[in-house]
């Protein structure tokens, strides 16, 4: 992995502790890697904020990124991805979380109806907790629902989460956005259920 990492500008080690195995995905704000914690020898995922040239934007994004981590810590639920540690190294903030090797829903469709109902039950269970805290995931899509090795579904990627009410911006996957998100209207739990 070392040669490949150097060729693709992928770090070899993050925070002098997490040995990068491979990239798992990249979004608008962050990159996710599969890593091995050299202290515990445990394989996990690590989400690292991408560096912005604009310092003011970088500070704002770092604040949102840290907020996302703290929200996930408070949302401990069997159907929401589990997070472990938060830190900052020379390239910026990161946090570690459980590795979900089962793939997202895009890789599993079409599903038999019984499996689809089981996944919907898992997602709704997670949403019930989120909505009870007056929060909205705001980016519910097949890409943000991953399946565990035993077939259970877990919600991931809480970077777009916001409180219920009038949003400051339009965020989400366009084909899964509810009409109130598109039109900038007040949001409640129905927005996630629509998605």
Image (cartoon, helix red, strand yellow):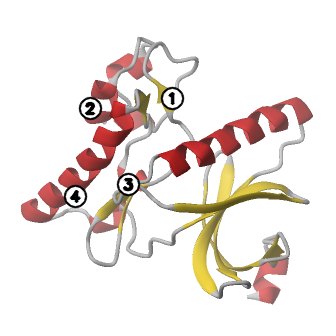
**Nearer the N terminus, badge 2 or badge 3?**
3
- State the CA–CA distance, disc 1 to disc 2: 16 Å
Rendered position, 181 above or below 110 = above
Q: Nearer the viewer, mark 4 or mark 2?
A: 4
**Residue at image location 45% in from the left, 47% down from the top:** 75
Sooner in the amino-acid sequence: mark 4 or mark 3: 3
Horizontal side of 191 relative to 24 (left or right) equals: left
Percent x, y for residue 125?
25, 48
Tell me the residue that label 2 is attached to. 194
Q: Is residue 155 above or below residue 19?
A: above
**Mark 4–mark 3 CB contact (< 8 Å):** no
Label 1 sits on residue: 162
Check disc 3 and report the residue beneath it.
77
In three-dimensional space, the C-alpha distance between marks 2 and 3, rounded to whole angstroms, equals: 22 Å
Q: Nearer the viewer, mark 1 or mark 2?
A: 1
Instruction: Label 3: state its secondary structure.
Output: loop
CB atoms of marks 1 and 2 within 8 Å: no
Q: CA distance from mark 1 to mark 4?
A: 23 Å
Q: Quote the CA–CA distance across marks 4 and 2.
A: 16 Å
Query: Secondary structure beneath disc 2?
Result: helix
Crowding at label 2, few (<14), some or many (≥20) Cα neighbours within 10 Å? few
Mark 2 and 3 residues: CB-CB less than 8 Å, in contact? no
């Amino acid at each position: 992995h070392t040669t490949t990492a150097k060729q693709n500008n992928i770090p070899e080690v993050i925070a002098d502790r997490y040995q990068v195995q491979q990239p798992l995905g990249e979004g608008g704000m962050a990159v996710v890697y599969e890593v091995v914690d050299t202290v515990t020898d445990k394989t996990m995922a690590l989400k690292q904020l991408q560096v912005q040239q604009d310092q003011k934007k970088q500070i704002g994004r770092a604040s949102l990124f840290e907020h996302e981590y703290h929200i996930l810590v408070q949302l401990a639920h069997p159907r929401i991805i589990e997070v472990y540690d938060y830190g900052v190294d020379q390239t910026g903030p990161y946090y570690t979380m459980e590795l979900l090797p089962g793939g997202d829903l895009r890789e599993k469709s079409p599903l038999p109806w019984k499996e689809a109902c089981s996944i919907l039950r898992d997602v709704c269970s997670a949403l019930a907790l989120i909505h009870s805290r007056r929060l909205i995931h705001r980016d519910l899509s097949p890409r943000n629902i991953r399946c565990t090795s035993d077939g259970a579904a877990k919600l991931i990627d809480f970077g777009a989460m916001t409180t219920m009410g009038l949003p400051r911006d339009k965020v989400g996957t366009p084909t899964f956005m509810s009409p109130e998100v598109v039109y900038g209207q007040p949001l409640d739990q129905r927005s996630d259920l629509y998605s």
